[in-house]
Amino acid sequence: MHKILYRSGDEKVYIVLFNDMPLQLSLNTTALLSMGLAKCFPDLVGVPVHDSVGKKYPSITRVPVIIMKAKSVGKLKAAFKSIQELGMTVVAFFEHSRSLKTYEDYEASMRQTRLDDLQPSGFGVIGSSQALKPQLKKFSLWK
């Protein structure tokens, strides 16, 4: 399990998506990447909250989530690799995965494929804005 250290208050989740995906695929990819990050970093999710009459509600993320867009798959792939080289955990979703029907199919396909041969649709990472700024400055906010 990966740990997040909340020291600076500067930690954010960044989801970077390829710009040319239809809205439905962008939303789906964002959900998949967010769940992958939450699995790696359970600290992302706060404790359940209670309303004024004591009703309990499941928790949500404790850190801001910034969604960005990449105009080029090449830049998306380069940023993914450079963030990995920093030793950070990066959750990625690859284009070939869209044609697969089950998670077992995904596992099997990943075992047979080199990372360099995959085209990312997007990736998610959590970290300090300052640490990630050099890798993410080439992307714009999703609007």
Image (cartoon, helix red, strand yellow):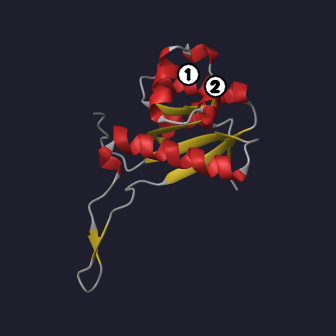
Which quarter of the rendered picture does the C terminus lie within? bottom right
Q: Nearer the viewer, residue 55 or 83?
A: 55
Q: Residue at x 69, y 35 (%)?
A: 138
Q: Amino acid at mark 1?
A: Lys
Q: CA distance from mark 2 to mark 1?
A: 6 Å
Q: Residues within 10 Å of mark 2 (few under 14, many from 20)?
A: many
Q: Residue at x 47, y 46 (%)?
A: 34
Point out residue 123 in the picture as x, y percentages from the top left corner.
55, 36
Image height of 9 relative to 19, above or below? below
Q: Residue at x 63, y 23 (%)?
A: 78
Which quarter of the rendered picture does the N terminus lie within? top left
Point out residue 28 in the picture as x, y percentages from the top left corner.
59, 48
Say which residue label 1 marks: 81
Image height of 10 relative to 93, above or below? below
Secondary structure at numbered mark 2:
helix
Q: Are marks 2 and 1 in contact (CB under 8 Å)?
A: yes
Point out residue 3 in the picture as x, y percentages from the top left corner.
29, 37
Q: In the figure, residue 93 lies in which quadrant?
A: top right
